[in-house]
Image (cartoon, grey):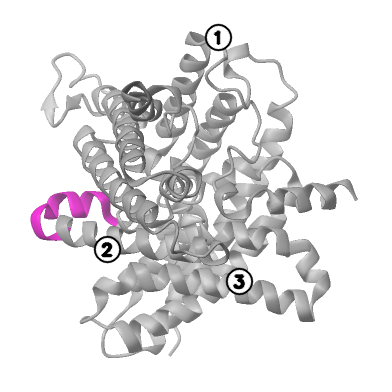
Amino acid sequence: MKNNKLKILTNGIIKENPILVLILGTCPFLAVTTQASNAIGMGAAVTFVLLCSNVMISLLRKVISDKVRIPCYIVVIASFVTLVQMIVKAYLPALDVALGLYLPLIVVNCIILGRAEMFANKNNPLDSALDAIGMGVGYTLAMLAMASIREIFGAGTWFGLPVPVLKDNNISIMTMAPGGFAIFGILIAIINKASNGKAIKKKDFSCEGCPSAAACNGQNCAEKREAAAK
Amino acid sequence: MIDFKGLLAIVMAAVLVNNYVLSQFLGICPFLGVSKKLDQAAGMSVAVIFVMLLATAVTYPIQYYVLGEDLKYLQTIVFILVIAALVQLVEIVLKKYIPALHASLGVYLPLITTNCAVLGVCISNVDNYMEAPTFGPGFVQAMFNSLGSGLGFLLAMVLFSGVRSRVDKCKCPECFKGMPITLISAAIVSVSFMGFAGVVENLLGG
């Protein structure tokens, strides 16, 4: 039993890392990883929202009718995002400026809605909380790894501290948009190589990889496929 | 009078310089997911333009007349619900009255609710163009910004679907197949858009 709980917790960190394996929530992942400190801030914000919304949705799972569950989840998630926005604005104004638009956009982050749909509405609050912590930590670690690479090589600093040689030889394109895409691609390729292609099973985009799979249950893709066949 | 040059500059800047997908990282999920075929990419983009315009036309007045400064903290929750409801409504209306359009755009509409580009454009419009005493000019600018952002999304999607159809046929190392090579090609497309920095200021004199 105890082992099972541990499994739920570690699932999100390695085996089903939301970013590097499931490839969910890529927008903020690419946008705010120019500095390691922003990555930590964003990761913490997402983890907090994920934890609160997972527990809340798990508690409400027998109350919410199946037909209106998606709007209900969105309201719950949006409330917690608003809470985070207020806290960040009040206590960490610098982070608020750095994250900008991406802070309110946590509400449409597919990881959160995805976990609500895939995990929290089927499991008890304790398991949902563990799942949320695992996923949140996995997300934060992936963000930190990506941001460290981009900040060290792109700006020659790490958490704002200068790195000896690289400070004078920085590759500034790494902190710009193209660098984000390229490094993300290389990171996934490395994980593919390291796990002999086992980690990322879906080479293609299926419903699993689709951010809206949670909301559409494959309905739209099926319709789309039929339309394509015609 | 209406400042056409300013409006043109807003559209051009949104399409080329601040392209939502390639330089601001909004709407990456559909960009990577639905860009495999040209017709799907174009269909999705047209649906996005449509919803962006509609969402701005609804959320901007809501912010101006209902939320204001006092209830600004409700912005996120109100906007996302309004957009979600709006998309549902549009789908129902299209299904009933314009079935042909529904057949081509309908499948993409539910996907757009969770598209961060739509919520992003609504929030940034309100942040950037709202000037407290008057409603009109800011609203027009916001609508043009939405149009530009949507067109930028269309441009990025269509360009990238062309790139992808070639990339998918090429040989590449096993571990790069699928997602990684797609991201690397996105990086190269994004480099080409960096070349547009400063173009709009120089063309239209800021």
Q: Chain of mark 3?
A: B
Q: CA distance from mark 3 to mark 1?
A: 43 Å
Nearer-the-camera pick, A102 or B170: A102
The amino acid pointed to by label 1 is Asn
Residue B206 can be seen, yes or no: no
* Disc with the residue nearer the chain's start (2 vs 1): 2
Numbered range of the magenta stretch: A89-100
Where's the N terminus of chain B, which quadrant? bottom left
Residue holding disc 3: B88
The amino acid pointed to by label 3 is Gln
| Quadrant in the picture for residue B201 | bottom left
Magenta: predominant secondary structure element? helix
Pointer 2 and pointer 1 on the same chain: yes
Nearer-the-camera pick, A1 or A160: A1
Residue holding disc 2: A82
- Is residue B174 found left or right of A28 in the rendered image? right
| Label drawn at residue A196 | 1
For disc 3, the neighbor class at 10 Å (few under 14, some 14 to 19, many from 20) is some
Q: Secondary structure at mark 3?
A: helix
Give the residue drawn at x 81%, y 73%.
B99
Residue B48 can be seen, yes or no: yes
The amino acid pointed to by label 2 is Thr
| Quadrant in the picture for residue B174 | top right
Give the residue drawn at x 57%, y 14%.
A197
Q: Chain of mark 2?
A: A
- Is residue A212 found left or right of A143 in the rendered image? right
